[in-house]
Amino acid sequence: MSESPGVYAICKDCPETFADREVMLAHQRGTMAPTREETGVVARGHSVRVVNPTPEEIETKRVRGIVDDAIESALHDAMEELDRAVQQGKITDEQVARELLDHRDFSDAWFEFLQEQRDE
């Protein structure tokens, strides 16, 4: 697991390495620069790569993956079910879109689903 013993993360923009998350975050904050001088919009600091995540971070990533997969599967099933209802003439694309306006994640997924269907 460990690419660099004793190193938590490495900077992808300079030769810095970091012993822990707090030092890494301080470096990112310290290297923040405006992306557009005329607007003063601050985008991000240096990019980093965690090479030795903590056990808690590993567990968080594992749990997040399981939850994300379940949500993605449910979303796919919902889109398929709505598409079947449209294909059977029970409801129209427009009716689905209107009803999903209050459910932004599902609404976005519906429009993506329709686009994919048209592209096939």
Image (cartoon, helix red, strand yellow):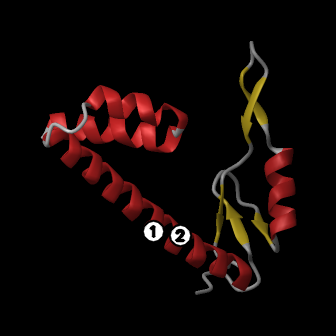
With respect to residue 100, does 51 lie above or below? below
> Which residue is at a point 24% across and 31% down the rendered structure image?
92
| Residue 82 point in image, percent of width and height | 28, 46
Q: Amino acid at mark 1?
A: Ala
100, 24: nearer the viewer: 100
With respect to residue 91, does 15 lie above or below? below
In-image side of 27 versus 5 (left or right) = right
Q: Quick one: label 2, few (<14), some, or many (20+) residues within 10 Å?
A: few
Q: Quick one: label 1, few (<14), some, or many (20+) residues within 10 Å?
A: few
Determine whether the residue tagged by mark 1 lies in a helix, strand or loop.
Answer: helix
Q: In which image quadrant can residue 86 be found?
A: top left
In the rendered image, the quadrant that contains the C terminus is top left
Q: In which image quadrant can residue 34 be found?
A: top right
Measure the C-alpha gap from mark 1 to mark 2: 5 Å
In the rendered image, the quadrant that contains the N terminus is bottom right
Q: Amino acid at mark 2?
A: Val
With respect to residue 16, does 30 lie above or below? above
With respect to residue 2, does 27 lie above or below? above
User: Residue beneath label 1, please?
Assistant: 70
| Residue 52 point in image, percent of width and height | 67, 79
User: Residue beneath label 2, please?
Assistant: 67
Q: In which image quadrant can residue 64 be found?
A: bottom right
64, 101: nearer the viewer: 101
> Which residue is at a point 33% across and 29% down the rendered structure image?
95
Q: How many numbered badges does the structure rendering display?
A: 2
In-image side of 57 versus 102 (left or right) = right
> Which residue is at a point 14% across and 41% down the rendered structure image?
87
| Residue 51 point in image, percent of width and height | 64, 74
> Which residue is at a point 31% across and 49% down the rendered structure image?
79
Q: Are marks 1 and 2 in contact (CB under 8 Å)?
A: yes
